Structure formats: C-alpha cells, structure tokens
Image: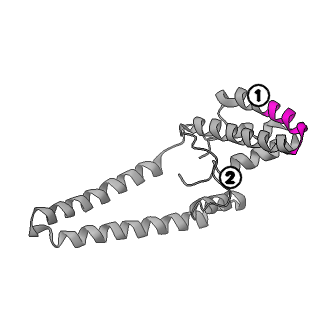
Amino acid sequence: MPPHCDSLDGPVVTAARKALDGKDVAQILPYVAEDGEPEVREAFALTVKARTLGPEAQEVADRWFFETVVRVHRTGEGAPFTGLKPAGLSVGPVIPAAARALDTGSADELSRLLCEIVREQVEERHRRAMALKEHAAEGVAAARAHVEASLSLQVWAHHLYKQAIVVPHTPTRRS
C-alpha cells in the first residue's frame, strides 16, 4: 500500500493531532478497531499529561502517540506497522481522487481514473501476450514466454475482478 495511513500527513495522524489539540480522544477512536481502543485511550491520557512538561516533552509524547495510533490502526487492518512515514510522500492519483469523491459527493472522477488505468493495463498485458503468441512456435522458450504472459493476464484479471467485487467486512474500516 502506498504511504497514506502511516504517514505524518495521513488521515490517522491528522485525526490524532486534532484529538490532542482539542483534548478529545473521540477524534481518533474511529480510526482504530474496537479492541485497540483501550490502548489508544491510555496512550492519549499519558500524552496529554506529558504535553504539559514543555515543548520537548510535547514533541516526544506526540510522536509516541502518533506511532501508537498508527500501529493500532494497522493492526486492525491486519497489516504490520513499519514506522511512521514522512509527510509529503506520493500516494499516486487514486487516493486523492477517492478523497475528492468523498468530499464532493461524486465518484465520477474516481470512476474515470480507475477505468482508464484498468483499460491501459488490459491493453498492455493483452498486447504483450499477443506479440509473444506470434513467436510461440519458435521453441520452448518462446512458447513458455507466451504462456507466462497469457496466464499473467488471466490471473491479473481474476485478482482484479475478485478485489472489485469484495464487500468490506466492516464498512467503517479504513485502509
């Protein structure tokens, strides 16, 4: 997954900052699974106390809190925590388009973007398989390359299809 939920400018850390600034733990709780809530509440309480000890203590406490909430968030997704990523990393075009869709209430841009990407990938993978098919009779290595490209297209398409029809287990979970 591209940097997003584990980056310093991602939605989890942004919500954590709001929680700390407003002294309202409820701002971050939607980003963690229910079983992670006690740990986040405890970390929040300790961080709020530590923030009163000066700017350096606040900086350390905030960083620890961000790491804690991102780790708990990632655990809820079944993903490993590999540390906080810096702000400003590219997440590609899809996450911002999805965010705009949620902000504007229209999924048109996101749909167009995804359809265009899928179309380009289908055409490129198909073109490669067809080009290799022309030389498949030239020996085992050529036939193997054709089979590999053909199966790669089929498996990729199958995985894409399966992912596209997945219904989320918990509609409130974020990636």
* Residue drawn at the location 76% of the way across and 28% of the way down: 42
- For mark 2, give the secondary structure: loop
Residue type of the residue flagged with mark 2 = Gly
Q: Which mark is residue 42?
A: 1
Residue segment shown in magenta: 44-55
Report crowding for label 1: few under 14, some 14 to 19, many 20 or more residues within 10 A (C-alpha).
few
In which quadrant of the rendered view does residue 75 lie? top right
**Is residue 94 shown in magenta?**
no
Seen in the picture, residue 86 relative to 22 is either above or below; the reply is below
Where is residue 5? Give x, y as percent. Answer: 63, 48
Seen in the picture, residue 24 relative to 141 is either above or below; the reply is above
Seen in the picture, residue 41 relative to 57 is either above or below; the reply is above
In which quadrant of the rendered view does residue 24 lie? top right
**Is residue 52 shown in magenta?**
yes
Q: Nearer the viewer, residue 29 or 141?
A: 141
Where is residue 125? Give x, y as percent. Answer: 33, 66
* Residue drawn at the location 41% of the way across and 48% of the way down: 162
Where is residue 164? Give x, y as percent. Answer: 47, 52
* Residue drawn at the location 26% of the way across and 56% of the way down: 151
Q: Earlier in the sequence, mark 1 or mark 2?
A: 2
User: Could you give the CA–CA distance between mark 1 and mark 2, rounded to whole angstroms?
Assistant: 22 Å
Q: Residue under label 2, please give it.
A: 10
Report crowding for label 2: few under 14, some 14 to 19, many 20 or more residues within 10 A (C-alpha).
some
* Residue drawn at the location 59% of the way across and 47% of the way down: 175
Q: Furthest residue to the front?
A: 56
Residue type of the residue flagged with mark 1 = Glu
